[in-house]
């Protein structure tokens, strides 16, 4: 049996091995089996078909030296895999590790099988397999890199857009306040606009700094102390109400909410969740914040109604720079701080407390973000 035929015959076992390894990577631990397998079958079948195709030495040399991406290479299964791994939060080291493990897995299965070719023909098969793997890896890395570049450009564009809005409000209010003989009512309105714009810019810059800190490896610092999350919930709601006077909010509190936590960080996390709920939820219904004290944990929930989050966006919703506009939303309907960092910051704060955060979204139940904080941190 040739190696290309062996790959096709043992495709399920090889793909299962791929999935098992991908789950050990940090970014893959919370992913579904379908997402972990991704385009693995298509990648292996493409390699096997390429191995079976007769090519001259010159054609193989040209392929090895071809570094300019073509339309076919940027839309191949390997390229799509690179794009999806970038979206899922994999870094380049983890992407390389997947292909390295796949190569080792195929070789291990091949060496342990019976009836395989030996000698020069076997060496030729392995050489062609390695060429196919290198080609797939190159396509995946090229697409991954292009997605990173696109995300960076979008990040800078959104940052400029979202800073320009509040700055324009401050500038206009300052011009109004400079007018002589201004009455008290317009003066108060201008001051309120400046205050709102400053608060929006502060939240935007804070999220940006927190994101930068985590990317530098420092993480989000947590200063634990005896904390009652009841007042923290109230403060978070007041902060959001000030910037969204037309939105209705409901608060439900029960049980003992005292535990060891960083009150300021938890207020930041709840404010981000509430802001996200206002942005993506329906203004015709209230945003609900619940806090329940259980025996061993405190459970916080932020609930909003409206269009549910698409199922394919749920696995990556806490990743930085990922934005999932609701179906039917208009282009101009943007958050005032829409860098796509809010939910990422929430997750980092919750994880630093030793807690967990999950999201469920459906038309019937709405979108529910659930934070569970243990009373006794690990």
Image (cartoon, helix red, strand yellow):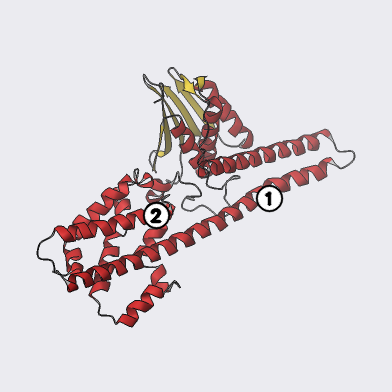
Q: Vertically, is 69 above or below 272?
A: below
Q: Quadrant of the N terminus?
A: bottom left
Q: Position of residue 176 (x, y in %)?
A: 82, 43
When asked about the image quadrant of residue 237, the answer is top right
| Residue 19 appears anywhere in the view | yes
List the residue tagged with mark 2.
Answer: 85
Secondary structure type for disc 2: helix
Q: Position of residue 33 (x, y in %)?
A: 28, 49
Q: Position of residue 111 (x, y in %)?
A: 17, 60
Which residue is nearer to you in this view: 131 or 367? 131
Instruction: Identify the residue at the far left of this view.
Output: 115
Q: Vertically, is 201 above or below 2?
A: above
Q: Residue at x 72, y 48 (%)?
A: 168
Q: Residue at x 42, y 47 (%)?
A: 316
Q: Quadrant of the C terminus?
A: top left
Q: Marks 1 and 2: in contact by CB < 8 Å?
A: no
Q: Vertically, is 373 above or below 215?
A: above
| Residue 284 appears anywhere in the view | no
List the residue tagged with mark 1.
Answer: 164
For residue 92, the mark is none
Q: Number of labelled discs?
A: 2
Secondary structure type for disc 1: helix
Q: Residue at x 57, y 50 (%)?
A: 333
């Amino acid at each position: 049996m040739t190696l290309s035929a062996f790959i096709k015959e043992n495709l399920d076992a090889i793909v299962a091995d791929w999935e098992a390894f991908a789950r050990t990577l940090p970014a893959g631990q919370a992913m579904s089996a379908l997402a972990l397998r991704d385009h693995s079958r298509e990648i292996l079948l493409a390699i096997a078909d390429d191995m079976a195709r007769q090519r001259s030495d010159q054609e193989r040399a040209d392929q090895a030296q071809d570094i300019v991406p073509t339309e076919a290479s940027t839309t191949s299964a390997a390229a799509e895999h690179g794009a999806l791994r970038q979206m899922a939060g994999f870094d380049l080291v983890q992407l390389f590790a997947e292909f390295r493990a796949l190569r080792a897995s195929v070789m291990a299965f091949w060496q342990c099988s019976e009836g395989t070719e030996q000698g020069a023909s076997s060496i030729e098969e392995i050489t062609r397999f390695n060429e196919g793997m290198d080609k797939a890896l190159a396509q995946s890395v090229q697409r991954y890199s292009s997605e990173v570049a696109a995300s960076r450009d979008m990040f800078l564009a959104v940052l400029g857009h979202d800073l320009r809005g509040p700055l324009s409000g401050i500038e206009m209010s300052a011009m109004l306040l400079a007018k002589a003989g201004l009455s008290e009512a317009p003066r108060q309105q201008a001051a309120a606009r400046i205050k709102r714009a400053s608060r929006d810019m502060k939240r935007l810059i804070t999220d940006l700094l927190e994101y930068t800190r985590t990317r530098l490896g420092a993480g989000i610092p947590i200063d634990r102390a005896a904390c009652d999350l009841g007042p923290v919930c109230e403060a978070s709601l007041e902060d959001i109400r000030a910037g969204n006077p037309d939105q209705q909010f409901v608060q439900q509190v029960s049980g003992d909410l005292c535990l060891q936590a960083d009150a300021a960080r938890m207020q930041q996390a709840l404010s981000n969740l509430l802001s996200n709920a206002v942005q993506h939820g329906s203004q015709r219904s209230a945003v609900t914040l619940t806090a329940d004290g259980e025996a061993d944990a405190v459970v916080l929930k932020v609930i909003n109604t409206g269009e549910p989050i698409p199922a394919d966006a749920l696995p990556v919703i806490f990743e930085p720079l990922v934005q999932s506009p609701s179906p039917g939303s208009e282009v101009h309907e943007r958050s005032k701080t829409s860098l796509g960092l809010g939910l990422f910051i929430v997750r980092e704060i919750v994880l630093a407390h030793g807690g967990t955060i999950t999201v469920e979204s459906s038309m019937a139940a709405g979108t529910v973000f659930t934070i569970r904080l243990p009373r006794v941190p690990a």
